Amino acid sequence: MQLEPLHPIQIQRFREMTFAEKWAVAQGLWLMARDARLAASRRANPDFTEEEHQKSVAREFARTRT
Amino acid sequence: MHYSEPRLTLDIDIPLLVSLKDIPTLLSLFQEPEYYCPPADVIASEIARDCRSHFNIIHIPTGLKADFYPGNRDATFAWAWQNRLTQQTQHGAIHIAPAEYIILWKMIFYREGKSEKHIRDIQRILDIQPILPHQDFLNEAIKTHALTDIWPIFQRPPL
């Protein structure tokens, strides 16, 4: 497995970040991923209600491994 | 994530000390329809295991999952609890396992399942924190758990 090296600036920044800052970034990534999947669900299933889209994406996330 | 880069994740691992008398509390905290929580008998049978106890709780509206690992009979859990890191948040204090405990268990899980995500996670921790505060514990645990032969997989030359 070839893991892309972090840039020294990234390493420096990640060392400086507080727990709250990292948590906020992770939360933002999660919201972005969820919004993208919701948009995909709306395109694929235009007959779904908003609640059905939300449930569909939640089910998908519950099965996904990261 | 706390010891490496912030990244997208959909689940969280929670080692915990839990006994049969705690099951009603767990069930009351994670109730339907907001949460999926296994039935009491499933949690009880997991707690009764000698090792590798495990159960999931899922936040149904978001699909976010917490993997609970009862560590009642695990000496490394006792060490991790003693050396936990506590962070204050707006929701209260949370406890974070020491990096060495995370690395150790990711090595154990890698040996069993060969999932490359464990290599990624460990290398990222070591990228950000090449000098571990409890390196002695990790060295000893690597020997105790017969992981010496795979330890080099997780290391790479400094940048």
Image (cartoon, rainbow, N blue to C red):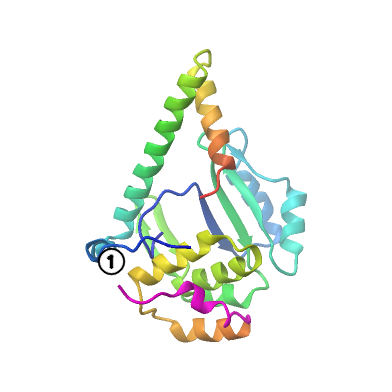
Residue visible at 67% across and 58% down in the picture: B54
Q: Position of residue B91 (x, y in %)?
A: 39, 50
- In this view, the residue farthest toward the top is A47
Q: Which residue is mark 1?
A: A15
Q: Nearer the viewer, residue B153 or B133?
A: B153
The answer to whether residue A44 is above or below residue B49 is above
The answer to whether residue B157 is above or below residue A58 is below
Q: Nearer the viewer, residue B56 or B20?
A: B56
Image quarter in which the C terminus of chain B is found:
bottom left
- The overriding secondary structure of the stretch rendered in magenta is loop
Q: Is residue B45 left or right of residue B143?
A: right
Magenta span covers which residues? B145-159
Q: Is residue B9 magenta?
A: no
Q: Position of residue B131 (x, y in %)?
A: 36, 79
Residue visible at 58% across and 60% down in the picture: B115
Q: Position of residue B132 (x, y in %)?
A: 39, 78
Q: Is residue B96 left or right of residue A12?
A: right
Q: How many other residues sit within 10 Å of disc 1, few (<14), some (14-19) or many (≥20)?
A: some
Q: Nearer the viewer, residue B91 or B153?
A: B153
Give residue A4's quadrant in the image: bottom left
Please state which amino acid type lies under the numbered disc 1: Arg
Q: Disc 1: which chain?
A: A
* Local secondary structure at mark 1: helix
How many numbered circles does the render carry? Answer: 1
Residue visible at 69% across and 65% down in the picture: B52
Image quarter in which the N terminus of chain B is found:
bottom left
Q: Position of residue B94 (x, y in %)?
A: 43, 59
Give residue A31's quadrant in the image: top left
Q: Is residue B147 magenta?
A: yes
